[in-house]
Amino acid sequence: MAAEGGAVELRAGALRLALRPDLGGSIAGLWHGAEPVLRSTEPAALAAAQASACYPLVPYSNRLGYRRFRWKGEDYATAPNFDASPHSLHGVGWRRAWAVAAAAADAATLRYRHEPDADWPFGFEAEQRFELTPQGLHARLGIRNLAPIEQPVGLGWHPYFPKRARSRLHLETTGRWEADPTLLPVRRVACRGIDGDVAPMAWDTGFDGWRGSARIRDEAFALRLSSSLDRLVVFTPPLQPYFCIEPVSHVTNAIHMAEPLQHGLRVLAPGQAFDAWMRLEVARP
């Protein structure tokens, strides 16, 4: 483990993982030798979590519609936090500094304690655990409710993958959420998944019923992404050199749906916790 200027680095075999706890508890980069596995920036050069390799989504994933919600008979609002979007995005963890709770050569634990504020009205504590092996990365993310009332929560990860000339994606699902022009989901349609070259794709879409894993292959790597979560957001902007496969616990904007719990929203009693894991296996093709 090496720490410099707020960064923490882990190594295992040919893999190197660089973390920036101070920038949203984000992963600055993951490399196999000199080749980036995720979109990667040397930690000293990373300026914001939004430009990182991966950041945590907590206490909710993706868009919270029009930055407001009603909970237990009370109306709440969240502050603008993402460009010109009318919604708040990705929770608060990615915009806050995390503390290093433990670090070793191949593992690290980060923690963040949230006090109620304009971005999220309930207190919570979140923890990330990273473990690196020669075969890949295992990450765990958890949240504990510190509020005196039940709290609605969700979590996930936002990893960015380099879009290479032969990048190809395969994943299996049961459903896809069609969205309105502001990218809030409006209806679920049956969908068996995605199988094809990434370059022509133009997704910014939620999927559920995710089965098993997502397989990503290109000229550099054969990757297998798996998680304890069964939903994904797939983001493949055509004009960008990256794409995102995001394991998440709930449908985007689930808190506004008629049956939020059926769409993955968790309700934690005071002191109750919820966690999930994500694994990225790395091999040469």
Image (cartoon, helix red, strand yellow):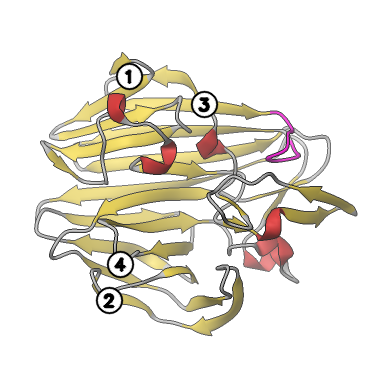
Reply above or below: 5 against 60.
above
Q: Is residue 6 left or right of residue 71?
A: left
Q: Which residue is disc 3 drawn over?
A: 97
* Amino acid type, label 1: Ala
Residue 104: mark: 1
Q: Residue most toward the front?
A: 84
- Locate the N terminus and report the quarter of the image it occupies: top left
- Neighbor class of circle 1 (other Cα within 10 Å; few <14, some 14-19, many 20+) is some
Q: Nearer the viewer, residue 259 or 85?
A: 85
| Residue mark closest to the camera, 2 vs 3 | 3
Cβ–Cβ under 8 Å for marks 2 and 3:
no
* Amino acid type, label 4: Pro
Asked whether residue 114 is drawn in magenta, I would say no
Marks 3 and 4, how far apart at CA: 31 Å
Q: Residue 199 falls in which quadrant of the image? A: bottom left
Reply above or below: 94 against 19.
below
Marks 2 and 3, how far apart at CA: 37 Å
Marks 4 and 2, how far apart at CA: 16 Å
- Neighbor class of circle 4 (other Cα within 10 Å; few <14, some 14-19, many 20+) is some
Q: x and y percent of residue 159 in the render?
A: 37, 49
Q: Which residue is disc 2 drawn over?
A: 195
Residue 238: mark: 4
Residue sitting at 38 percent across and 25 percent down? 108
Q: x and y percent of residue 118 in the render?
A: 72, 38
